[in-house]
Image: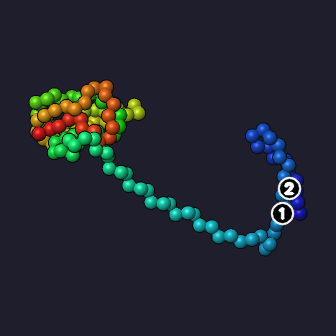
Amino acid sequence: MQKRFRVTVDGRDYDVVVEEIHAEAAPSFQTQAPLAAPLPSAPPPPTVGPASGAPGAQTAPLAGVVESIPVSIGQAVAVGDVVAVIEAMKMKTDVVARDAGTVRSIAVAVGQPVEAGMVLVAIG
């Protein structure tokens, strides 16, 4: 048995014909939800210049703009002290010292754009 319907989609009218089929005449399909593909692991941050892999080099974890540098050259820092703050997409990220020591150099300035992996501060 066929039935006619008028369907409106996005303001446009469509005339459709629907046919009723009985359960015994209907084709049988088995479906399975697709398996989720494994997520690729994040690539390591790029290195910028030869000093980025140097011991004591504190690097930017993401691209953004240097919001502040609360340390100065010659200042002693402990592991976990904030050495820079990067702003990206209106979110601020603290860059903390991975090494204890004295700030040897500051490679960036407040307001400077940085890329992930770029050296911000060197601690020795």
Q: Inspect the image, locate mark 1, and give the three-letter code of the amino acid beneath it.
A: Glu
Instruction: Give the labeled residue for mark 2.
Output: 17
Q: Inspect the image, locate mark 2, and give the three-letter code of the amino acid beneath it.
A: Val
Instruction: Find residue 61 and report its image quarter.
Output: top left
Residue 80: in sight, yes or no? no
Q: Is residue 100 left or right of residue 46?
A: left
Where residue 114 sits in the image (x, y, percent)? 32, 34
* Foreground pick, 91 / 111: 111
Where residue 95 sits in the image (x, y, percent)? 26, 37
CA–CA distance in space, label 1 to label 2: 10 Å
* Foreground pick, 123 / 27: 123
**Residue drawn at (50%, 60%) of the image:** 36
117 is higher (above) or lower (below) than 88: below
25 is higher (above) or lower (below) than 72: below
* Foreground pick, 68 / 6: 68
Where residue 100 sits in the image (x, y, percent)? 13, 41
**Residue drawn at (37%, 51%) of the image:** 42
Where residue 33 sits in the image (x, y, percent)? 57, 63
Instruction: Find residue 52 and report its image quarter.
Output: top left
Of helix, strand and loop, which one carries label 2? strand
**Residue drawn at (31%, 28%) of the image:** 112
| In this rendering, the label closer to the viewer, 1 or 2 | 2
Q: Is residue 27 left or right of residue 1?
A: left
Instruction: Give the labeled residue for mark 1.
Output: 20
* Foreground pick, 46 / 71: 46
Residue 30: in sight, yes or no? yes
Extreme residue in the bottom direction: 24
Label 2, residues with CA under 10 Å away: few <14, some 14-19, many ≥20: few
**Residue drawn at (83%, 63%) of the image:** 20
